[in-house]
Amino acid sequence: MINSLTSITSAHILRTVYFACFHAHLRYGVSLWGGDPESKNIFRLQKRAVRILNRVDQHVSCRNLFKELNILTLPCLYIREVVCKARINWGQMKQNEEIHDHSTRQKSDFHAQYCRTTLLKNSYENVGIKLFNKLPNALKKIGKPQEFKRRLQTFLRQHVFYSVDEYMAF
């Protein structure tokens, strides 16, 4: 649909259609399915849509296009949703300094529980803690949930991550 509208509408209207028809479907349940390896196929479709919005060739890199359009990549959407859910459960999580007595660099990070199974290791609660711990300290210290979500989204738009692994290595 976006491709067929390219020749008859402006870039602004195309972007609106993208958010109404494509982005809305991406966001639905992304915290549950976004970490699945098969989500790479959906991310390819998102990159294709972004290229169509910018009217560029299929071989052009999308990193700058995502920044220009202020669109979060699928991995960034997943990171945002999972980290915000972890942030909601902030009061129930324990920090590393509550678990052990010695002082470490990660004492203010939240403690991720030990996981024997892959199912628990990949659960959005456990992944959310790990992703939250990787945030810059300035973001972690924001008290108001709405301010946190807004600044997290700005951070993710600036850094355009193509995978969760890329975010974890940042």
Image (cartoon, rainbow, N blue to C red):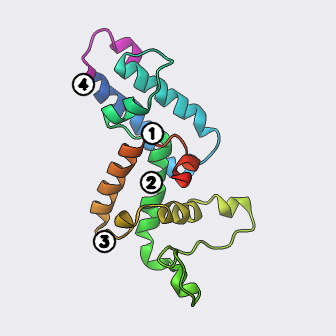
Which amino acid type is marked by label 4?
His
Image coordinates of residue 46 in percent, x first then y, are: 47, 30
Q: Residues under labels 2 and 4: Cα distance?
A: 26 Å
Kindly report which numbered mark, 1 or 4, lies closer to the viewer in this rendering: 1
Badge number at residue 100:
none
Please say if the residues under marks 3 and 2 sit with CB atoms less than 8 Å apart.
no
Please tell me which of labels 1 and 4 falls first in the chain: 4
> Which residues, given as a range, are shown in magenta?
1-12
Tell me, for residue 73, which label it has, or none. Answer: 1
User: Could you say which quadrant of the image residue 99 lies in?
Assistant: bottom right
Seen at 57% across and 60% down, the residue is 127
Residue type at mark 3?
Answer: Gly
Measure the C-alpha gap from mark 3 to mark 2. Answer: 17 Å
* Visible residue check, residue 29: no
| Closer mark to the observer between disc 4 and disc 3 | 3
Q: CA distance from mark 1 to mark 4?
A: 19 Å
Q: How busy is the neighbourhood of tag 3: few (under 14 within 10 Å), some, or many (20 plus)?
A: few
Residue identifier under label 3: 143
The three-letter code of the residue at mark 1 reads Thr
52 is higher (above) or lower (below) than 130: above
Helix, strand or loop at mark 2? helix
Q: Earlier in the sequence, mark 2 or mark 1?
A: 1
Residue lying farthest to the right in this orientation: 116
Residue 12 has which mark?
4
Q: Give left or right: position of 39 versus 109.
A: right
- CA distance for labels 3 and 1: 26 Å
Secondary structure at badge 3 equals loop
Q: Which residue is mark 2?
A: 81
For badge 2, the amino acid type reads Glu
Residue 90, image x, y percentages = 43, 73
* Horizontal side, residue 128 vs residue 140: left or right: right
